[in-house]
Amino acid sequence: MRYSKAFVPTLKEVPKDATTPSHVLLLRGGFVRMIGSGIYEMLPLGRRVLAKIERTIRREMDDAGAQEVLMPALLPAEYFQETGRYDSFGGALFRLKDRKGAEYNLGPTHEEIITDMVRRDVKSYRQLPLNLYQIQMKFRDEPRPRAGILRCREFLMKDAYSFDVDEAHALESYAVMRAAYHRIFKHLGLDYRVVDADSGAMGGSTSAEFQVLVQTGEDALVVCSSCDYAANVEVAETTLPTDEKDTSDSPAAEKLHTPGVGSIEDVVAFLAKTLPDISAARMLKSLLYLVDEKLVMAVVRGDDDLNEIRLARTLGVDEVFMASEEDVKKATGAAVGFAGPVGFEGEVIIDPAAAAVTDAITGANETDRHLVHVRHGRDFEARVESVRMVKQGDPCPKCSAPLESYRGIEGGHVFVLGTHYSKKMGATFLDPSGEEKPVVMGCYGIGVSRLMAAAIEQHHDDDGIIWPMSIAPYQVILTPLGKAAGPLEAAEALYEELRVLGVEALLDDRAERPGVKFKDADLLGIPLRVTIGQRGLDEGLLELKRRDAKDAEKLPIAEMAARVATLVTELGGELTPRSAKA
RNA sequence: CGGGGUGUGGCACAGUCUGGUAGUGCACAAGCUUUGGGAGCUUGGAGUCGUGGGUUCGAAUCCCACCACCCCGACCA
């Protein structure tokens, strides 16, 4: 491509609304443009990057035995109504009506549609297994789109669905997909981890997220410093403390006046004068949750956070909701901030770490009063369950080495769905003995457009993007300098040589000053740059510079094309050789 | 949905408090000079001041309502 003909509207200034690196650089580099909250258009460069990501995904999915389909984005409401998700999806579902008043929704995901596709034809175990996928736009009315292309209302996604005769075979399909995902993420040049994840309220049992490790990620993860354990903090486990419980006596509980200090920090600061060894670790944090219309108190140590997902699992429900201020007042008789397990009427769950505190401070269920010298088992009873959020430094549940905290962007999610949809939608088959059974499903997503942003979050510097070769919009940029004819002619010749070798080159034939060309080249993040200046030409040399390196390499003109092609291949790029022009 | 903020040429902003008919830089067009890291000078084109209403002789500016977008939180198959 000739730069002078390319539609690449780069920006010198940072658009006001862009905050994260990927958002800023995608806009500045002319890859994408926002036309509404969470709605982006893909300009030529952005489209090329997406196409590269799609190509890698297609190849690995096809190799893994999956077949590509394309489902509609516009869906008659009856499909999501059939599984109840037309309502349960809530506000996230884009709903619309046609001119006759019939209801539709835009596809936020396609389990219903694919299940319908399969149930129409699959009647026998002989037709299974099956794995179908598509790469298509998804629509979700996010409560808050953010971070540019990382959380959009319309986004490109690859979603695959497997269909098997039983759980064991479904697990095999799952394993095949998981392996394919590893190849995809590696080839895309991303630093990622596979982590244990919440499978949600879908009845799924086995699931894993492919998390791209970046500081700006939305998800908090813990990764073992020693073994391969990694998990989303939502579901992370840790070895329970095995310390023997302190049986020595502690003073009897005592009520203290703590006017206006409700939060853990405030109480610690307030009591620091009278109790010298106070710390958040001696506080009991008592949180009230609405569970099936009953109030349940969850108690964790003051320096811990409650994990709502673990609490919900422990209580055997899909979801728990933080109690409202009024509910808290009604249940404890005190303002928010003064709740405590002592004397609380209702179920109390306490985390082991909190239960182990033998001389604790907690709310007294009385406004402006706290209790000191409180002890689980003596002053109150509670069910001991692990409900706290695992954090940095906690021991790994597998090997006890300390866990490390990371943040990540969820780039992919694989999971076994079981028969959740097939039962509801009657997707059944006859097994060899003639018995009718529901197919066992799995689903596998990759956020294609999100990965484009994730790659930038991971690979950029102050000057711009540094694309991994495998997804770069062009593999090399040729930068002839100066007004004289020599450099441009040499660049044209090299451009043709590279074309024949199959290298994707961008020829910066614009009548711009060198500084402008260099700045744009760095911003766009093309992995290789060949600089063609009169100075070099006089010595018969061209310069080759990697975007991710500081120094350039000087090569004789005749060797440059071959060198570039070799480097492209070494860095994970592909060549698509063409025939020479007649 | 709660809290905070912003809407003024393509982009980034000033002007709003204290009302008088819109400006700066970049970008764009033309000319001259310049040419290895976002050049200089000259000239020029381009703006319903988010929308609607109100106050006023007069509104980007004051008042009311609405809309859009961003950030924090809630939420996120």
Image: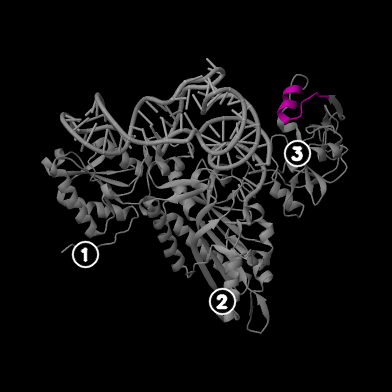
What residue span does the magenta drawing correspond to? A257-271
The answer to whether any part of residue A245 appears in the image is no
Q: Secondary structure at mark 2?
A: loop
Task: Tell me which chain the residue with mark 3 is part of.
Answer: A
Q: Is residue A459 above or below residue A172?
A: above
State left or right for residue A195 relative to residue A561: right
Q: Mark 2 highlights which residue? A: A128
Q: Mark 1 highlights which residue? A: A579
The answer to whether any part of residue A52 appears in the image is yes
Residue B15 percent coordinates (x, y): 48, 22
Which three-letter amino acid code belongs to the residue tagged 1? Answer: Ser
Which three-letter amino acid code belongs to the residue tagged 3? Answer: Ala
Q: Mark 3 highlights which residue? A: A354
Task: Tell me which chain the residue with mark 2 is part of.
Answer: A
In-front residue for pair A452/A181: A452
Q: Earlier in the sequence, mark 1 or mark 2?
A: 2
Q: Secondary structure at mark 1?
A: loop
Q: Secondary structure at mark 3?
A: helix
Q: Is residue A437 above or below residue A407?
A: below
Residue depicted at 16% across the width and 48% down the height:
A490
The answer to whether marks 3 and 1 mark residues whose Cβ atoms lie closer than 8 Å is: no
Residue A557 percent coordinates (x, y): 15, 48
Q: Quote the CA–CA distance across marks 1 and 2.
A: 44 Å
